[in-house]
Image (spheres, grey):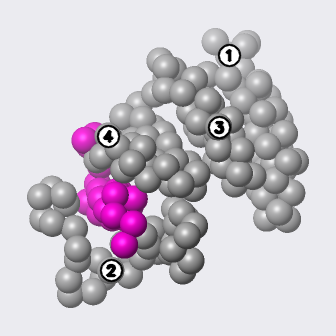
Amino acid sequence: AVWQRPCAHKVAEVAKEIGKASKQGKLDEAIERHQELCELEPENPAHQLGLAKGLADAEHYEEALKVLDRTEDSPALTVSIRSALLEDRGDVELAAGRLGSASASYKAALDLPNGESKRRVLALKRLGAADPDRRFGAADRSRPPSAAGCALAARRICTQRWCPVSRDEHD
């Protein structure tokens, strides 16, 4: 109902504050603003995903996973948001060093309808999480790779003449 919606200007203002705090590396402030945004529009699962990412950026992995768990039960999840949630879960698990769980989350996201480029990135993230010898973006093999490193490696590899992901995983 229109009368229950928060002021769009307030939502935009808080979103702008999140971006500013994130760019300045003020992770705690960004998390607080994400929480405020979630309170303003609790039915919007995209805000919950943003909160989970903010928590993961601050290395609060368990809290991020709890937010994703709560969000997974939201009736407002579309297929594309569910896919993003599963990818985000994989990214958090990957950052926490839980490679098997990350691989399973990427697989679950791959099982949903996605565009070709998204499927390719998911497949490469899964490949990197499943095989420590292919951990893209991790110069130091004792640390887990970053999701951004996986995505960057995916773009680099798949623009070359060969790709380690089988045709079956792309389709």
Q: Nearer the viewer, mark 3 or mark 1?
A: 3
Classify residue 14 by image quadrant. top right
- Helix or strand or loop: what does disc 4 sit on? helix
Quick one: which residue is furthest to the left in this view? 168
Label ID, residue 2: 1
Classify residue 46 by image quadrant. top right
68 left or right of 124 in image: right
Q: Which residue is mark 2?
A: 157
157 left or right of 39 in image: left
How far is the residue under mark 2 from the one under mark 3? 31 Å
The amino acid type of the residue labelled 1 equals: Val
Q: Quadrant of the N terminus?
A: top right
In the image, which residues are magenta? 111-133
Q: Residues within 10 Å of mark 2 (few under 14, many from 20)?
A: some
The amino acid type of the residue labelled 3 equals: Glu
Label ID, residue 108: 4
How far is the residue under mark 3 from the one under mark 1? 35 Å
Label ID, residue 62: 3
How far is the residue under mark 4 from the one under mark 3? 20 Å
Of the residues under marks 2 and 3, which one precedes in the sequence? 3
